[in-house]
Amino acid sequence: MKYIDGFRNPDAAAQLVRKIAEQGRALAGRRVHMMEVCGSHTMAIGRYGIRPLLPENVELISGPGCPVCVTDPGYIDAAIALAERGVIVATFGDMVRVPGSASDLTACRSRGGDVRVCYSPSAAVGLAKDNPDREVVFLGIGFETTIAPVISVVETAVREGVRNLSLLTAFKMVPSALRALLTDPEIRIDAFLCPAHVSAIIGARVYEPLAAEFRVPCVIAGFEPLDILYGVYGILGQMLRGEAKVENQYARVVRPDGNTKAQALIARYLEPVDAAWRGLAVIPASGLGLKAEYAAFDAAKKLGIEIRPGKQHAGCRCGDVIKGKIRPTECALFAKICTPDRPVGPCMVSAEGTCAAYFKYGAEEGEKR
Amino acid sequence: MNGTEHVIQLAHGGGGRLTRDLIAREIVTRFGDGPLRGLPDGATLPSPGERLIFTTDSFVVQPLEFPGGNIGDLAVHGTVNDLSVCGGEPTWLSLALIIEEGLPLATLGRILDSVRAAADACGVTVATGDTKVVARGQGDGLYVNTAGIGRALPEFSLGPDRIREGDCVLVSGPLADHGMAVLAARQNMDFVNGPRSDTAPVHRLVLAVREMGASVRFMRDPTRGGAAAVLNEMVEGSGVGILLKERELPLSPNTRAVAEMLGIDPLHVASEGRVILICAPEAEAGILARWRALPEGAGAVRLGVVSRDKGRVVLETLAGGRRLVDVPRGELLPRIC
């Protein structure tokens, strides 16, 4: 904890906030829209009350980096269908309350579906061994960070001859989403606060083509308050100097080439596929699916489940929130019809969802004073 | 929306918003017009002579034994503490056991030894009880219910309506140890030097401040839902709020480390041996001194102040920002007590 406490030092934070205020004044007349890509950043920004500490003309907008939020409702429908067939559906806790087209996994469990929450994907292997006469399906969602540990489940299952375990995959890759956002004419993004743990896997260099092609500063930052403030400071510094490059403020974890071991693991089992993103539609080659030779671990193929496009609530604006087009408070449902207890859209459910962050840490506290 | 409105979900037991909605809708509407009005931790009963306080609590914690305690001492402390924070001196307990077929007698024996030891330490008598056995698979080892009766201490006149802006919010020791210890004791989480439950009686802490009773506005024990739930309940719907400072939150290093690792807000996690007390500002020093003189109050500190932030609990963060401290939601930690 001593190590972490260094990145939460209140005096250092106050000093950085003062420097950022100076940068804000130097940029007077310009509005800066920087997007924090990652859901964990969104939560940390809320948890430490960082948004109101920034200058009036600097805005941190939340991006698509919550894996639960970008999962299409049709995927939830498929998971429910599996549980209704008597399959044990194992999942990270975040997923159980994400709305599908007509229901969610919590409701499915209350009706008798066998839905188990796992803290670690490896627990799914244990579940499969403990229930040898039943099929166990682990919900394989997530970005690069989560993909490696989830896919290691397949590696364990292959090694230990576990045959009743498979993955329902909807893995997604962050850089594809960033490119889609930058080419969307309706969205203005001046800079990216790039994710911490995703970057630890994919490496800092991955963002270089984006920074160069679209002239957007990209700064990789950690999740502690000083990390985030330092990331903002780095972005504003680049803008003042007229630069647009990749800066790695999280060098204590992120390497230029990332985690090559994890990359190799991913490449061994998975290959790029087109993926449906809630809010961003289908982006070609933006997801990862199991290769044909591992079809025995691919729940969709093994159990004959098709993931069809799902329906979402007509008034839900999660898609616009995910793209950073609106803030949660601009959605008519926010905190009125859509709350964490009765979520309408995934951004309100997920522990990393933007709407949940605004609700949990206070919409009023999230605004500038 | 999703069809779950019509069945009980695990989250209905989580101590958060759904628990409160369930109680408001199903209990208060049927039983809320007598001593249950306002949902205190215990009911104050009119009786000839002294006033009595009456409460009951059921315990379904899993695992039955955890670092720092077991379901037996927890069941005594839970009820003793509810009586105490209502300004009562605990006197009698009932003890009801629902035992699942197959529970080892040795386990039952250890747990009942703990009940006896805890009752003795609290000066309460187990006056009545009941034992039922259910078939294997119809229970989960052991469920315990305790009810308790205490004498109302005349020095206290407590109620959330007595809280004023500028009052001090005190806590008798570090937060969240019980919930984190139970969570850590669950399967697949073997921590070396993990958190230990703080399960303990708080009656001596309450007795220690009875002579300052007139300055004490309100007390609660931050069990299910943690300090966040209790603080929100204290100010909900009122004209005041509570301001906490993250810098000053009392957390034991082990609990803090595990909460950090699991991404859990310790303000949402239960304690089972702490009191949160709101008092007039001039009483702060006296109460803290009396608490710190007792071993169970050695870690007592000021947790925050009563602000004018209507009905809201707000945390001043380490980064210097502010954020809301909301009530917990969902099934963060089912079956911790």
Image (cartoon, coloured by chain):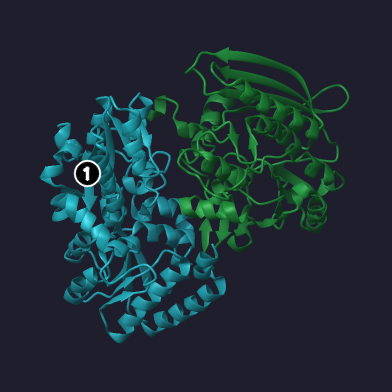
Chain colours: A cyan, B green
Residue A308 showing in the rendered view: yes
The residue closer to the viewer here, A60 or A151, is A151
Task: Kindly identify the amino acid type of the residue bearing the numbered disc 1.
Answer: Thr
Output the chain of dot 1: A
Q: Residue at x 23, y 41 (%)?
A: A158
Report the front residue among B249 and B159: B249
Q: Is residue B151 above or below residue A167?
A: above
> Quarter of the image containing the N terminus of chain B?
top left
Which quadrant of the view contains residue B117?
A: top right
Q: How many marks?
A: 1
Rendered position, A93 above or below A107: below
Q: Position of residue A329 (x, y in %)?
A: 38, 54
Callout 1: SS: strand
Q: Can you give x and y, in whole percent of width and height, for residue A146 in the image?
A: 31, 52
Q: Quadrant of the C terminus of chain B?
A: top right
Left or right side of A292 for B57: right
> Where is A296 relative to A257, above or below?
above
Residue B311 higher or lower than B330, as above or below: below
* Rendering coords of residue B269 (x, y %): 56, 45
Q: Tell which of A123 and A235 is nearer to you.
A: A123
Q: In the image, B181: left or right of A329?
A: right
Residue A311 in which image quadrant: top left
Label 1, on which residue?
A: A169
Q: Position of residue A185 (x, y in %)?
A: 17, 65
Q: In this orientation, does residue A73 appear?
A: no
Instruction: Specify few, some or many for label 1: CA neighbours under 10 Å numbering under 14, 14-19, or 20 or more.
Output: many
